[in-house]
Image (cartoon, grey):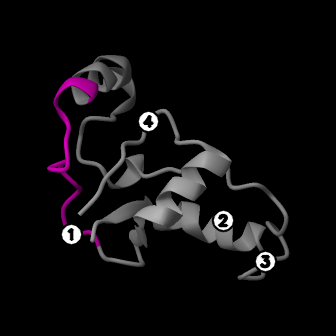
């Protein structure tokens, strides 16, 4: 069964939004679109963003290259497909992010 990767910072914001974690500064703030661009290697650098989006659209598949030395839960969280689908439906997918399954 495939699992989908989401940036841990986005998941922290989402947990705070749904009050699974408590933070006085951020409680109640929507997390914004689902994001995982911070864990992708190279392609999403700011000055090359538009060209890379096009190239990534053409060539990226489930072999998406991730940054080196990522640590599960510290850098990313794995979620089942049903959770990924619901989160993307409710919040959208950040324009700089990709669907990453493993």
**Residue indicated by mark 1:** 69
Q: Position of residue 90 (x, y in %)?
A: 67, 50
Magenta stretch bounds: 57-70
Q: CA distance from mark 3 to mark 2?
A: 8 Å
What crowding class fits label 1: few (fewer than 14 Cα within 10 Å), some (14-19), or many (20 or more)? few
Q: Position of residue 56 (x, y in %)?
A: 25, 30
**Residue indicated by mark 4:** 96
Of the residues under marks 4 and 3, which one precedes in the sequence? 3
Looking at the rendered structure, the secondary structure element under dot 2 is helix
Residue 19 tag number = 3
Q: Main secondary structure of the magenta part?
A: loop
The residue located at (27%, 71%) in the rendering is 1
Q: Position of residue 3 (x, y in %)?
A: 33, 67
Q: CA distance from mark 1 to mark 4?
A: 21 Å
What crowding class fits label 2: few (fewer than 14 Cα within 10 Å), some (14-19), or many (20 or more)? many
Q: CA distance from mark 4 to mark 3?
A: 27 Å
Of the residues under marks 1 and 3, which one precedes in the sequence? 3
Looking at the rendered structure, the secondary structure element under dot 3 is loop
**Residue indicated by mark 2:** 14
Cβ atoms at labels 2 and 1 below 8 Å apart: no
What crowding class fits label 4: few (fewer than 14 Cα within 10 Å), some (14-19), or many (20 or more)? some
The residue located at (36%, 62%) in the rendering is 4
**The stretch drawn in magenta includes residue 67:** yes
Position above or below: 38 against 6: above
Of the residues under marks 2 and 4, which one precedes in the sequence? 2
């Amino acid at each position: 069964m495939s699992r989908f990767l989401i940036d841990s910072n986005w998941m922290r914001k989402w947990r705070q939004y749904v009050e699974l974690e408590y933070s006085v500064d951020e409680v109640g703030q929507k997390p914004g679109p689902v994001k995982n661009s911070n864990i992708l290697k190279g392609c999403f650098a700011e000055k090359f963003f538009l060209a890379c989006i096009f190239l990534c659209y053409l060539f990226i598949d489930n072999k998406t290259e991730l940054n080196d030395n990522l640590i599960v839960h510290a850098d990313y969280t794995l979620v089942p497909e049903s959770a990924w689908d619901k989160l993307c439906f409710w919040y959208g997918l950040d324009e700089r992010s990709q669907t990453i399954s493993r």
